[in-house]
Amino acid sequence: MVNSELEFQLSQYLDGTLPAEEKAALEVQLAADPEARGVLDEYRKLDAILKNAPPLPSVAWDRLATRISDAVAADEETAPVSILSIGYWRLPAQLALAASVLIAVGLAVQVWMKGGERAAERPVAVVQVVGPQVEAAAGEAKVAVEFGPASPVAEHVAASSYSEGLVAQPSRVIIATGGEVAQDTDSIY
Amino acid sequence: MEPKATGNDLGSTSPTDGQLVAQALAGKRDAFDKLIVRHQRQAVAVSYRLLGNTNDAMEVAQDAFLKAFKSLGTLQKPEAFAGWLMRIVSNLSLNYRRSRKLRTQAPLDDVAEPAGLDEPRHNLEGRELGEKLREALAQLPEKQRLAIVMFTIDEMPQKDVAAALDCSVEAVKWHVFQGRKKLKELLKEVM
């Protein structure tokens, strides 16, 4: 079976577009490969059908050229007059774009000017935000609780190379009755 | 016989497509008329392969030249006018196929000359083969169809086909190959 790459070469060989070296190599292969010759023959038959397809019917080319030229001239006459010779159809779009830009700039200037005039009249609101206050405990301390590692462990940890990663310092919390419960903060005072 | 030369050949005394485009943009109407004469046959031929009808093909060709004239200022490579025009023709032809409708403009019947009895298109076998070929072409993906029509049937240079399809010359070779492969299968009964 002829592979796709060889078939592509045969197609180019038929068109005379194969590079000289590849053409020479292919001709050697064709001499020895009947299957490849068979595929080439099929392509030749197909090309004969394509090139012998019903020819273009007779056309009065002079009259057609005149008809086309007249149509172009008629279209040119109805097109908007332009001082530019290139791309009439682009001029209306360019004018529309320029007009849009001018209108936008004009509006922006108006808004800016009116904004300056009204600056003195603009009301200003000042708002002060006051956070919740921490209330100190009203009563005496009832109990003191210490958190942290036991002393022998604390001594061991201090000497350990992991000391930075462990809680070595005891925490001290004083629990007392008092007034209303305050919002959590870093300190109980 | 319409000359196929684009005027881009070295040593040619006629202006190149690029020069004619520049002159047309400068306001010289006869420059665009020269482009019409130079490329109308190819435009009609490409459209005819896709539509199968002479009058439709001529109308599409006219529309394509109109559109090209209006958009001439957008053409970035004036020397590639031919390929650019063929792309407009192929797009308009495909749109025309998709929405066939009666047109209000006068048909171009007076431009198509009556065919003689011995012309191939009046031969039954030729007509049937032509119809089978158009049906097969219609089943191809667009780029393969256009590559086959422009390069294989109408023998446009591959670089012009590449410009029309907006792809490389290597891609055109690939599209032609893939199109051939499919057509070989679709037309095996008549081969």
Image (tube, coloured by chain):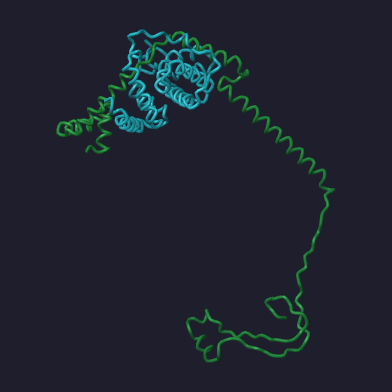
Chain colours: A green, B cyan
Q: How many marks?
A: 0
Q: Is residue A29 left or right of residue A149?
A: left
Who is closer to the viewer here, B27 or A163?
B27
Among the 4 quarters of the image, the one containing residue B148? top left
Who is closer to the viewer here, A68 or B99?
B99
Q: Residue at x 69, y 86 (%)?
A: A174
Q: Residue at x 49, y 86 (%)?
A: A159
Who is closer to the viewer here, A98 or B156?
B156
Who is closer to the viewer here, A15 or A107?
A15
Q: Residue at x 73, y 87 (%)?
A: A176
Residue A138 visible in the picture: yes
The quarter of the picture where the N terminus of chain B appears is top left
Please tell me whether residue B189 is drawn above or below residue A141 in the rendered image.
above
The quarter of the picture where the C terminus of chain B appears is top left
Among the 4 quarters of the image, the one containing residue B153? top left
Residue B76 visible in the picture: no
